[in-house]
Image (tube, helix red, strand yellow):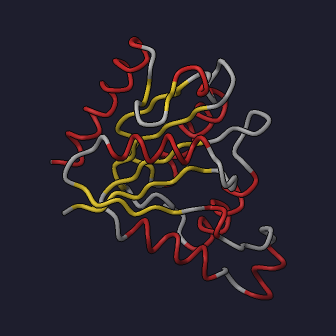
Amino acid sequence: MKKLLVLGASSSRESINRVFARFAAEQVSGVHLVEVDLSQLNLPLFSVDLERSDGIPPEARDFYATIAGCDALVVSLAEHNGSYTAAFKNLFDWTSRHESKVWADKPMLLLSTSPGGRGGASVMAAALQTFPHLGGKIIAHFSLPSFGDNFQPGQGITDPALKEAFDAQVALFQAAVSA
């Protein structure tokens, strides 16, 4: 059975992106889910000086090893002030110092959501531009606007047009994972 890494890129214990990433991953058949919880990582703030004195933290090496050990990735990006969350950016920065191809050329379903009507569109645009240069093989992507209005636990995406668009992206990803 193929392994699917699931990451909600927020350190919030009640992260809607963690919920959304898990929901999306559960729509993919024939996979075992491997979840990474950013709230459980204890990484120092990235600094070249700290890297020189102490090296790359084990958590960053372990994160890359987890990615490398999986067959595909589902990543849902939270947006803070139009960009990545501090916790995700810090993990991303440390991991890229260990391995520049952070995403290890694994097929990726890239997601974002937020309470607002843009659904994390700014962070999605940033990731679509930069992730491919860092080993991100983005097969499909989807932003869900207004999470609280358009998603219900146990039901999923409630807006029919958004659900149809989401399902089409998951189908593209499923085909890549199954290949």
Classify residue 177 as left or right of residue 132.
left
Most distant residue in the left direction? 179
Q: Position of residue 4 (x, y in %)?
A: 34, 57
Image height of 150 relative to 12, above or below: above
Image height of 66 relative to 127, above or below: below
Q: Residue at x 66, y 55 (%)?
A: 13
Most distant residue in the front direction? 154
For the residue pair 37 and 47, the one nearer the viewer reads as 37
Image height of 59 relative to 7, above or below: below
Most distant residue in the top direction? 161
Classify residue 9 as left or right of residue 11.
left
For the residue pair 53 and 156, the one nearer the viewer reads as 156
Most distant residue in the right direction? 49
Pick the quarter of the image with the N terminus.
bottom left
Q: Residue at x 71, y 61 (%)?
A: 90
Q: Position of residue 157 (x, y in %)?
A: 44, 25
Q: Position of residue 154 (x, y in %)?
A: 41, 36
Q: Position of residue 46 (x, y in %)?
A: 77, 68
Q: Residue at x 49, y 37 (%)?
A: 111
Residue 89: quadrant of the picture: bottom right
Q: How many marks?
A: 0
Q: Residue at x 76, y 53 (%)?
A: 86
Classify residue 109 as left or right of residue 111.
left
